[in-house]
Image: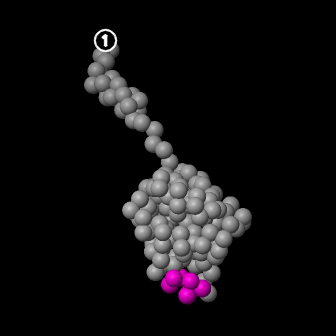
Amino acid sequence: MIEFSCPILLVLSRELVKKQAMPKQEPKRVLAVVNDLFFSVKISEAAKRNGLALEFVKESGEVLEKAKGRPSLIVFDLNFEAVEPLELITKLKASTETKSVSLLGYLSHLQSELKVKAQDAGCDMVLARSAFSQNMLMIFKRHAGIG
């Protein structure tokens, strides 16, 4: 005679209920204030590999508006002068709506004066472009909540 174990069936049923009841989470967002097409591709690939929703923004007003949606991270090319990144960073950190958003700036390793200015403006992390490139996957992983 074959016996069926009801507890196993209950466990399976609970698992099915858990899967159905769990709402699908939206991926965390990253804004990239970047003008370099080559580097944009690298950023896109790293964000995609970590399940992040990435949006490129090329206008100051748009950055300020989209930051109100509290992205996980905003990446700035500190040499993208058209958007005045230092001024944007200062405004983002001064606003109660956006001051908690993590800001990362990257620049040439030779630009130590710009690095200090970005840190003074409120940029949470300033990296040489090469260091950002090497650590991009790990940085995005952390901001995706994976690592």
Q: Which residue appears at 35% of the width and 25% of the height? A: 13
Q: Is residue 44 left or right of residue 118?
A: right
- Res. 134 in view: no
Where's residue 134, x and y in %?
58, 71
Where's residue 140, x and y in %?
52, 61
Q: Which residue is mark 1?
A: 1
Single out the residue that lies furthest toward the right: 37
Q: Which residue appears at 47% of the width and 77% of the height? A: 121
Tell me if residue 57 is in the magenta stretch.
no
Single out the residue that lies furthest toward the top: 1
Give the magenta part as a residue range. Answer: 111-117
- Residue type at the position of mark 1: Met
In the picture, which quadrant includes the C terminus?
bottom left
Q: Is residue 34 left or right of residue 70?
A: right
Disc tally is: 1
Q: Which residue appears at 57% of the width and 72% of the height? A: 85
Where's residue 77, x and y in %?
61, 71
For residue 97, what is the image quadrant? Answer: bottom left
| Picture layout, residue 15 above or below residue 137 | above
For residue 9, what is the image quadrant? Answer: top left
Our reading of the magenta stretch's main secondary structure is helix
Tell me if residue 116 is in the magenta stretch.
yes
- Could you classify mark 1 by the number of other residues whose Cα lies within 10 Å: few (under 14), some (14-19), or many (20 or more)? few
Q: Which residue appears at 48% of the width and 72% of the height? A: 90
Where's residue 15, x and y in %?
36, 31
Q: Is residue 21 left or right of residue 58?
A: left
Nearest to the observer: residue 124 or residue 138: 124
Dot 1: element: loop
- Res. 28 in view: yes
